[in-house]
Image: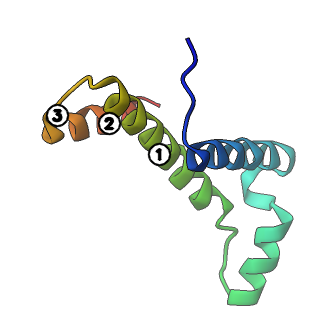
């Protein structure tokens, strides 16, 4: 049984995978692009890890939301939001 996702979710999944690979190669604190951005804006630290943490919660939330809506697991929006937040916190 095929379960195609939306193009946005495929893009975000690919981006999250790429972000993890870059973070694994350079370590999150020393990604060269964000070192350059830090110097440009005068930041004291490399903020690549902040982008990583945001994506670690955002992409699973969209994936969980899409699956819950398509499979009609829960009809009440309040429970749906609770389940999505619970899934994100479990990651």
User: Can residue 77 be seen?
Assistant: yes
Q: Residue at x 37, y 38 (%)?
A: 65
Dot 1: what SS?
A: helix
Residue 57's tag is 1
Q: Residue at x 44, y 43 (%)?
A: 62
Which residue is nearer to you in this view: 42 or 69?
69
Marks 3 and 1, Cα distance to the nearest angstrom? 18 Å
Marks 1 and 2, Cα distance to the nearest angstrom? 10 Å
- Which quadrant does the N terminus fall into? top right
The residue carrying pointer 1 sits among few (fewer than 14), some (14 to 19) or many (20 or more) residues within 10 Å by Cα, namely some
Splitting the image into 4 quarters, where does residue 72 fall? top left
Dot 3: what SS?
A: helix
Residue at far top of view: 1
In primary-sequence order, the first of circles 3 and 2 is: 3
Which residue is nearer to you in this view: 70 or 46?
70
Q: Residue at x 85, y 51 (%)?
A: 26
Camera-side mark, 1 or 2: 2
Q: Pointer 3: what residue? A: 79
User: Can residue 88 be seen?
Assistant: no
Q: Are marks 3 and 1 in contact (CB under 8 Å)?
A: no
In primary-sequence order, the first of circles 1 and 2 is: 1
Marks 3 and 2, Cα distance to the nearest angstrom? 9 Å
């Amino acid at each position: 049984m095929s379960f195609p996702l939306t193009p946005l979710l495929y893009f975000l999944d690919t981006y999250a995978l790429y972000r993890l690979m870059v973070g694994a190669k350079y370590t999150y604190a020393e990604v060269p692009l964000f070192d350059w951005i830090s110097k440009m804006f005068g930041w004291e630290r490399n903020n690549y890890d902040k982008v990583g943490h945001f994506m670690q919660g955002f992409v699973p939330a969209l994936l969980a939301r899409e699956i819950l809506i398509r499979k009609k697991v829960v009809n009440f929006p309040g429970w749906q939001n609770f389940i999505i937040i619970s899934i994100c916190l479990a990651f």
